[in-house]
Amino acid sequence: MLTDVGMLPFGLHYDLLKWSIAAKLCRCKLLFVSVGVGPIRHPLSRFFIKTALKLADYRSYRDRFSKDYLEGIGFKTNGDAIYPDLAFSLPRGIVPTSQERDNRRGLVGVGLITHSRKRATSENDEEMYQDYIAKVAAFVGWLLERKYTVRLLIGDVAYDMRARQDLKALLERNGWKYNGIEIVDEPAHSVDQLLSQLVATDVVIASRFHNVLLALMLGKPVVAISFHEKVDSLMSAVGLTEFCQDIENIDVEKLATQFAALNNHAEYFKLQVQRKTESYRRALDRQYEDIFGAATAHESAAG
């Protein structure tokens, strides 16, 4: 978590520096692998994170934004690599397979997020959050009118329950029933449960980063409602830039058009995403070979 959104310096970032120092004192290899970075605004958080990174024997970042962000706050990243997020290398054995569904209604996953601000400097947070919920509700209503089943996806049970409850209340006021046929609302309490929910969907519309990422890892066509540059970077990298919207400026009509385009050409986009994510898996395999091969050689020399 190389960001200070929602956290103070003398928490995770101080612990990160302490563990990094302990690792070096114990003559251990210290590696920061495929990490995301930013924003980091507090001067102490910047000091703790940059000092920990300086101690590392190896650093790589999951996107260009993260590397450029560090450069922008005065950290030299010369020689550091860019590799995909480690989630793309999850063992194939833990990835569930699609199962036949009892009904023929298309199943659309809609991922929610309570943190609706794209940038921590944004004002009128509550107003933007209510606008986000209203627009997601409007889009869900559009899907239901066209006889799709909507599966609500909660990527973070601790933080996103408010969005789930607020959306439910608004949909019910609009006359939609939570009967398990039109709207499926079963929050996931583990990664395995979230993967099982995602794999059953036909198309995913989501905001939280790992909802988007895991859906792509499963080869799903995705529309992203982006709250951060990391989501933009991910969608761009898999060739889906045109299917990304800013969370602060959601256009419901455009969202419906984006969904229709993905859904009508689902097989094409699935193949595109699968090819890209498979290349990510190969790239991460190379990174593992490099870093663990070097670590093994170091241990052999020391022995």
Image: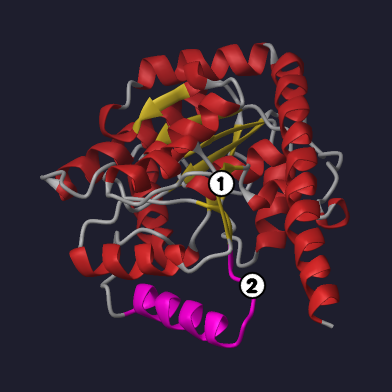
Residue located at (56% from left, 14% from top): 260
Q: Does the magenta-highlighted stretch encompass residue 99?
A: no
How far from the left and from the top, in percent, is residue 122?
16, 43
> In terms of secondary structure, what is the magenta stretch mainly?
helix
With respect to residue 100, does 61 lie above or below?
Answer: below
How far from the left and from the top, in percent, is residue 203?
63, 30
With respect to residue 172, does 48 lie above or below?
Answer: below
Give the residue number, with chain letter if any, for mark 2: 29
Amino acid at circle 1 = Asn
Query: What crowding class fits label 1: few (fewer than 14 Cα within 10 Å), some (14-19), or many (20 or more)?
Result: many
Task: Determine which of the numbered discs, if any, sits on residue 211 in the image.
Answer: 1
How far from the left and from the top, in percent, is residue 93?
88, 55
Point out the stretch of residues depicted in magenta: 11-31
Mark 2 and mark 1 residues within 8 Å of each other at the beta carbon: no
In screen coordinates, is 218 left or right of 56?
right
Query: What crowding class fits label 2: few (fewer than 14 Cα within 10 Å), some (14-19), or many (20 or more)?
Result: some
Is 266 or 238 nearer to us in this picture?
A: 238
How far from the left and from the top, in percent, is residue 189?
60, 67
